[in-house]
Amino acid sequence: MPTAPRPITRRFGDDGQIPNNPDLPVVILKGALDPALSPDAIHDIQRGNGWTGNWVWTVFDYHHWHPDAHEALSVASGHADLMLGGPQGELFRVEAGDTLILPAGTGHCRLSSSGDFAVCGCYPQGQGRYSTCRAGEGRDRVAEIARVPLPDTDPLSGPDGPLIRAWRGSAEDRG
């Protein structure tokens, strides 16, 4: 069962290359999972909380964003330096056991990683057929970001998890 760490949240503005999400913050949960969990066990947790489209791989080594889906990345092994928010964003070191939840539109890129770095990715129910735009592309799709529905559950902790608390407050703030 995952622990409920205090979330780290960050907001990023549109930098002309990456739109980011004007309404919702990135949520980072350091040490949310036991770093010894297998990818299958991580996927069981994610699917059990309604997050699907599960995969195991890495993070692209170029800046990109998804206009039509929120994305959760749980680090299954190794470590990496990820740039969030686009080329002018913020660098984060992630390691096995960490989870990042990226709202639609958020730029992300792997700058470096250990040889064994792998993430278990997933999406809220109904968002598993997503699009990927590289930095500087897809500007005609920015309006889609605001239409992506909020998830009903946190990918690790269910309906009352840290993601829901962070995003529910943001949604209330925007009216």
Image (cartoon, grey):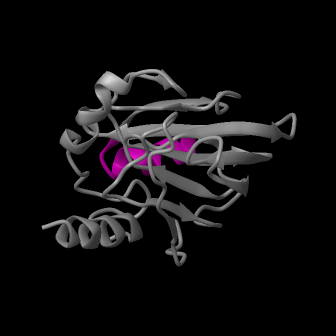
User: Image check: 63 left or right of 49?
Assistant: right
| Residue drawn at 49 percent across, 42 percent down | 43
Q: Vertical placement of 96 versus 68: above or below?
A: below
Please report the residue visible at 35 percent of the width from the left and 32 percent of the height from the top. 67
The picture quadrant where one finds residue 51 is top left
Choose top left, top right, bottom left or bottom right for residue 149.
top left
| Total count of labels | 0
For the residue pair 42 and 129, the one nearer the viewer reads as 129
Q: Residue at x 18, y 40 (%)?
A: 147
Question: x, y percentage for residue 175?
Answer: 12, 67
Of helix, strand and loop, which mostly describes the magenta segment? helix
**Outermost residue toward the front in this view:** 16
Side of 134 relative to 91 (left or right): left
Name the one closer to the observer, 63 or 35. Answer: 63
Instruction: Answer above or below: position of 17 versus 86.
Output: above
Q: Nearer the viewer, residue 2 or 94?
A: 94
Expressed as whole percent of the image width and height from the top left, the position of residue 169 reads: 26, 73
- Does 107 sit left or right of 79 as displayed? left
Q: Nearer the viewer, residue 24 or 2?
A: 24
User: Residue 25 location, x and y as percent?
Assistant: 42, 61
Q: Is residue 45 above or below residue 111?
A: below
Residue with the most extreme bottom position? 6
Is residue 129 something one can see in this rendering?
no
Residue 5 is left or right of residue 76, and the answer is: left
Q: Position of residue 74 (x, y in %)?
A: 58, 48
Stretch of the chain drawn in magenta: 40-51
Q: Is residue 30 above or below residue 89?
A: below
Q: Work out which residue is located at the far right of the displayed protein and give it.
A: 115
The answer to whether residue 144 shows anywhere in this view is: yes
The residue shown at (64%, 48%) is 88
Let me know if residue 43 is in the magenta part.
Answer: yes
